[in-house]
């Protein structure tokens, strides 16, 4: 059986992508926790287009969510 080796998303080092690697796709617990910390601190962000909806009810022309 061939071992599938992938690049660790955190350090780019070799990481076995198989059930025996508890941290897959990461190579180690350290890399996995580093990545989780980056998400938790909002270092990673997903871009989204700016909202065209006005959510401030005090602004003229605001869209009311109350019925």
Image (cartoon, grey):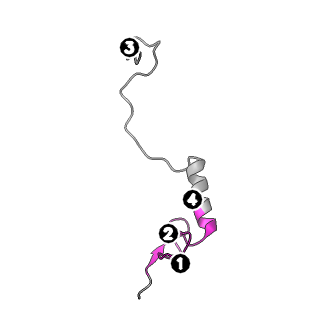
Instruction: From this view, report whether residue 49 is shown above or below residue 61.
Output: below
Q: Nearer the viewer, residue 29 or 20?
A: 20
Q: Please report whichever mark, 2 or 4, sits nearer to the chain's N-terminal start.
A: 2
Nearer the camera: disc 3 or disc 2 = 3
Q: Which mark is residue 35?
A: 4
Task: Judge whether residue 20 is colored magenta.
Answer: yes
> Which secondary structure dominates the residues rendered in magenta?
loop
SS at badge 4: helix
CB under 8 Å between discs 3 and 4: no
Residue position marked by numbered label 2 in the rendering: 25
Instruction: From this view, report whether residue 46 is shown above or below residue 24.
Output: above
Task: Name the spot of residue 64 as percent of width and height, x first.
Answer: 39, 16
Residue position marked by numbered label 1 in the rendering: 20
Q: Which mark is residue 67?
A: 3
Residue lying at 45% horizontally and 15% vertically, measured from the top left: 57
Nearer the camera: disc 2 or disc 4 = 2
- The quadrant of the image that shows the N terminus is bottom left
Residue lying at 44% horizontally and 84% vertically, measured from the top left: 3
Cα gap from disc 1 to disc 4, whole angstroms:
20 Å
Nearer the camera: disc 3 or disc 4 = 3
Q: Which residues are magenta?
A: 4-32
Q: Is residue 63 left or right of residue 40?
A: left
Q: Please report whichever mark, 3 or 4, sits nearer to the chain's N-terminal start.
A: 4
């Amino acid at each position: 059986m061939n071992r599938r080796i992938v690049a660790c998303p955190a350090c780019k080092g070799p990481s076995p992508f198989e059930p025996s690697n508890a941290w897959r796709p990461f190579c180690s617990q350290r890399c996995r926790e580093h990545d989780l910390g980056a998400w938790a601190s909002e270092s990673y962000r997903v871009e989204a287009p700016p909202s065209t909806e006005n959510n401030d009810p005090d602004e003229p022309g605001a869209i009311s969510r109350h019925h």
